[in-house]
Structures are given as structure tokens and as C-alpha cells.
Amino acid sequence: MDVPGIALITGAASGIGKATAFSFARDGASGLALLDLNKEALDAVKFGIEDQERERGIMNPCRIEVYPLNIGDESQVNEAVQSIASTFGRIDYVANAAGVAMKHEGGAAFVETSDWDRILNINLSGSLFLLRAAAKIMLKQEPILSSRDSRPLQRGSIILFSSIQGVAGIPLSTAYAATKHAVIGLVRSSSEDYAKDGLRINAICPGYTETPLTTKSPQILQAMKERVATAVPMERMGRPEEIADGVIYLAGGRSSFVTGTALLVDGGYTQR
Ligand SMILES: NC(=O)c1ccc[n+]([C@@H]2O[C@H](COP(=O)([O-])OP(=O)(O)OC[C@H]3O[C@@H](n4cnc5c(N)ncnc54)[C@H](O)[C@@H]3O)[C@@H](O)[C@H]2O)c1
């Protein structure tokens, strides 16, 4: 899929971020910087990818480094991104899968300010902190040409995580839906800032996907299965790998003319 460069992936310890890390390695990235709150799980992902590369007999396995951090802490994000740039020499693809979801019992009228602040900090401010730190570096680095057919000026690609809740409402999800709508606004505005410089910025909007976010609580899983049966034309949840493939498309040279968009990977949910 034409992703030979260095990928920075947050939320890489679990679910879609973890699948994205495996997919970048499979599709030929030369380096992976894996970021998450959970250091142990990050290490397990690193070892898993290294094992897979050994089993596949890859001659030049990709270099993998892990960076435990809180995406909602701007100084931690700045420090990690600087460190990644000096360790790997450049950053070509950024996928910000770190995120948290929650339901507010009783709906918007009963949202706790502390819950609102936490979800906004991680999902929205975290997206800005990462975009800001990475874009400063990506804008200065030499452009790379597509390994396929030398398409013009590719200075890098940033993919922020929105959701079907970035374009539609779901009950009891005030803070989460607000952040996911806002991420699309962030993408639209910032993509305009740098389109002419060859830095592309897009959002991905996963539909219901089988990850710990949706499956760890039996109640949430049950509610989700009932909703999926009626609301998703494909009548199933997505697999993390199916979302990761959308990220790889937006990261690589095959999407060289795509910026400022929100790619829905949702089994048809939002067309209904
Ligand atoms: N699973 C779905 O159905 C679904 C649907 C739409 C959008 N999304 C979005 O996709 C992204 C990935 O979700 P997932 O389902 O893989 O979730 P997940 O819970 O499996 O993984 C999220 C990861 O983010 C990390 N994380 C959480 N807070 C963090 C913080 N403050 N700093 C650093 N890392 C942090 C967690 O440790 C975890 O490893 C999220 O942005 C989510 O909102 C998921």
C-alpha cells in the first residue's frame, strides 16, 4: 500500500491502534513509533510484530520503539514527538487512535463536568497536541515521492480519529459525540492550512468495531449487538483490521490527492 516511511501511532496498545501498527508493519513501513498510556501492552504489541516479521522471514524488519504517554498532556506529547523525530530521522504518517468513550446516565442534562473535561482533553485536545507537534516537524522535512509512480510533493499524512459519532448522534454520548464532531472540524481547517505544502490531514470515522472499547463490558456489548442488527446495513461489527486498512490508505501514496476528508468505514451505517 505504499507506506515505506516512519509511522507514529497512538492508542497502539489496543484495538484499532494495535491493528494499525500490525498493518503498517505488514505493508512495509520502515519504522514504527508506538504510543499509549499502557506500557506493558505496548511492549506486547512490539514483540508481537517482531515475532510476525521473523516468522515471515522479513530481511529488513521495521524498527519499533515504544513511548508511554498521556495524549492529553501537551508537554508529554511534545517531548515524545521530538524524541521520535530524532530517533527515526523523520515522521511520515501519524495515526491518532488513542481515545476514550463513555455514556452519561440520564443524558446531556446530567453530564458531570469532570467527565466532559476528561473526554475533551483526551479525544480533542490530544488530537490537537499531536497534530501540532507532528506537523511542525513534517512541514520542515524533505518531501518523499511515492515509491510507485513519483506522485508530486508528499510531505506526510496525519489521520485523526473521529467516528460515526462525528457525523451522527447516538443517545447518552454527549461528550464523546461532541469531540468526534470537533475532530472533523480540526481536520477540515488544518488540512486547508497545509494542503499546498504537501502535508495531508484527514479523519477516519469507524463504525461499530470489535475492540476492548466496545466489548469489555457485557452490557455495552449486548446493547451494541442489538443496535448493529438493525442499524448497520452489513448487520455486523467491523474488525479492527478493516479500520486499519482505511488508515493505511489515507497514510500512503495511493491517497496522494485526498486531504480534509472524513473517511467512513462503517458497514453502511451513516448512509441509512
Ligand atoms: N471501537 C469502535 O467501535 C469505535 C468506533 C468509532 C470510533 N472509534 C475510535 O477509534 C479509536 C480507537 O478505539 P478502540 O476501539 O481501538 O479503543 P481501545 O479502547 O481498544 O483502544 C484505545 C487505546 O487508547 C489508549 N488511551 C486511552 N486514553 C489514552 C491517553 N490519555 N493517552 C494515551 N493513550 C490513551 C488506551 O490505553 C487504549 O490502548 C478511538 O479514538 C475511538 O474513539 C472506535
Image: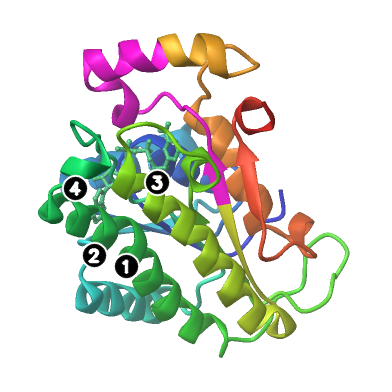
Q: Nearer the viewer, mark 3 or mark 4?
A: 3
Q: Secondary structure at mark 4?
A: loop
Distance from the alpha carbon under mark 2 to that under mark 3: 18 Å
Contact between marks 1 and 2 (CB within 8 A): the answer is yes
Q: Give the class, few, some or many, for how many residues have Cα within 10 Å of label 2's Cα (few <14, many ≥20).
A: many
Q: Is residue 145 visible?
A: yes
Q: Which mark is residue 177?
A: 3
Q: Which amino acid, mark 1? A: Ser
Q: Residue at x 77, y 64 (%)?
A: 256
Q: Quadrant of ligand 1?
A: top left
Horizontal and vertical percent position of residue 194? 64, 82
Q: Which image quadrant for residue 73?
A: bottom left
* Front in this rendered view, residue 227 or 235: 227
Q: Secondary structure at mark 1?
A: helix
Question: Which disc is residue 125 wearing?
Answer: 1
Give how far across and how far down residue 139 sits, in percent: 57, 86
* Image side of residue 101 versus residue 5, left or right: left
| Frontmost residue, 227 versus 221 | 227
The residue stretch that appears in magenta: 204-225
Please give the label number shown on residue 38: 4
